[in-house]
Amino acid sequence: MTDANGTDGADEGGIRVASPVGRWVVLTTVLGSSMALLDSTVINVALPRIGQDLGTDLAALQWTVNAYMLTLAGLILLGGALGDRFGRRRVFVVGVVWFAVASLLCGIAPNAGVLVASRAMQGVGGALLTPGSLAIIQASFHPDDRARAVGLWSGLGGVGAAIGPFLGGWLVDGPGWRWVFLLNLPLAAVCVPVALRHVPESRDPDAHGRFDVLGAVLAALALGLVTYALIEVPEQGASVLVIGAALGGVVLGAAFVRLERRRADPMVPPSIFASRQFTAVNIVTFCVYAALGGFFFLSAIQLQVVAGYSALGAGTALLPTTVLMLLFSASAGDLGRRIGPRIPLTVGPLLAAAGMLLMLRVGPGASYLLDVLPAVLVLGVGMVTLVAPLTATVLAAVDTGRAGLASGVNNAAARAAGLLAVAALPLLAGMGPEAYRDAGEFASTFRRAMPMCAGLLVAGSVIAWWAVRASPAARAEPRPACATHCGVTAPPLEPEPGSGHT
């Protein structure tokens, strides 16, 4: 394989992580995906200040988070298919540029309506760049180095996600919450030229058929209507509009499933779920990221409104997870390759659940060393244990030519989980529209919400123990590399109909 300048950066079968080109590829994909990850976490610390500045209620803050998650979850499968067809690097670069423009609009938004609309635009860019970043790694690196490359990507990307609250707090307390979004502009300015110069292009030669735009629209509308119902029911009650939205979401979801079963080239081909490993790990992903999405949304507010931390203090409180992800995620990826994913995917969620339950100790006047730090450390160990093996297992369960599709499905599961958790947890915990302005009310609802998050993680652990079996390495390595030495393993001898390259 050669980079954009024709320099050889790979040996037989793909790029090596230790090569100069390998380092550039990891850097570029981490930079791009970190933009999306940062905006998924930075925003949580900024929410109380955004609410005060723009005069919004809790529902508007939920939409500030969920407008982004909605378009990201609804369109990420289409983004993966576009990368498989037209080139993963090309679609990745388009996504980075789109995301940067939308971030600028968020940074200058004059009111909550414009902010929410711009956040939805950000999600479109994220849907283009997020699956491409992981698919580039899977398609580019030598089979022996893929687990480590995914571990580096997961770890460094996780660092971006974890450092978000710290960085967001510093920006909110300093130049203001708008810089939370404007920060993406210099990241994009570095990422785009590096990608064009150093990242090799890859695509699926078997991609064919029409794009399933109708499927993407149905998925996004179904998620949007269900989300609307969950967010609005505390204020509107069981109104005709809320009930109609909920029923409409269910009907459109069923229509989406029916459409995907009948189309010749579906966005989500049912055949991909024939793999028990792939299906099980995506269910585990949903449980894990629903819990994490709810946790980070609520804990950032809990630390500020109830415990009395500043935005910077709340962000700094979560910093130990950054250190743990930085130090140990690559090793966790290697460990998962050696021992298989079952143990990490069982133990990791249990540790994370324990960390969330320890957060119940955080209340008014909470001590950081005695109350916050133990919870954050246990949560961080759980995240380190499960994130890299989770990602590697999803990709190893399918053919490399379907890497964009597999990445898209897994990311859609994760984002939809976070979206629904942020919408549903305040409802299930009994939060009112003004709860984030009242320390006593928010504290009581937080105490009801954390066991729910922990329960989701326990459910994910049980599913992993019961359903996940084979080692990722054992599933991925037997296929030979293609004759062009492009790092993409050969597709099945007889491509399945409706292979997802829509």
Image (tube, grey):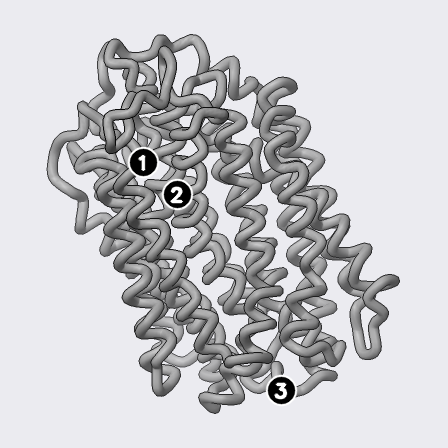
Q: CA distance from mark 3 to mark 1?
A: 49 Å
Specify the label residue 198 is tagged with. Answer: 1
Give the crowd class for mark 3: few <14, some 14-19, many >=20 residues within 10 Å: some
- The numbered mark, 1 or 2, whose residue comes first in the sequence reads 2
Please, what secondary structure does the residue beneath circle 3 have? Answer: helix
- The answer to whether the residue labelled 1 contacts the one labelled 2, judged by CB atoms less than 8 Å apart, is yes
Q: Are marks 3 and 1 in contact (CB under 8 Å)?
A: no
Calculate the distance from the C-alpha at mark 1 to the C-alpha at mark 2.
Answer: 9 Å
**Front residue of this view, candidates 395 and 158:** 158
Placement of 286 over or under 437, stated as above or below: above
Amino acid type, label 1: His
Question: In the image, residue 484 lies at what x, y percent?
Answer: 24, 13
Question: Which residue does the numbered mark 2 point to in the structure image?
Answer: 28
Alpha carbons under labels 3 and 2: distance apart: 40 Å
Residue in the picture at 42% in, 69% down: 181
Mark 3, residue position = 437
Can residue 158 be seen in the rendering of this structure?
yes
Please give the name of the residue rendered at 47% of the width and 48% of the height, measured from the top-left corner.
Answer: 414
Mark yes or no: residue 262 visible. Answer: no
Earlier along the polypeptide chain: callout 3 or callout 1? 1
- Identify the image quadrant of the N terminus: top left
Residue 104 to residue 501: above or below:
below
At 83% from the left edge and 72% from the top edge, which residue is drawn?
A: 366
User: Would residue 383 appear left or right of 196 to someone viewing this image?
Assistant: right
The residue depicted at 38 percent of the width and 14 percent of the height is 11
Left or right: 88 in relation to 341: left
**How far from the left and from the top, in percent, is residue 425?**
58, 66
Q: Residue furthest right?
A: 370
Image: 170 above or below 292: below
Between circles 3 and 1, the one closer to the viewer is 1
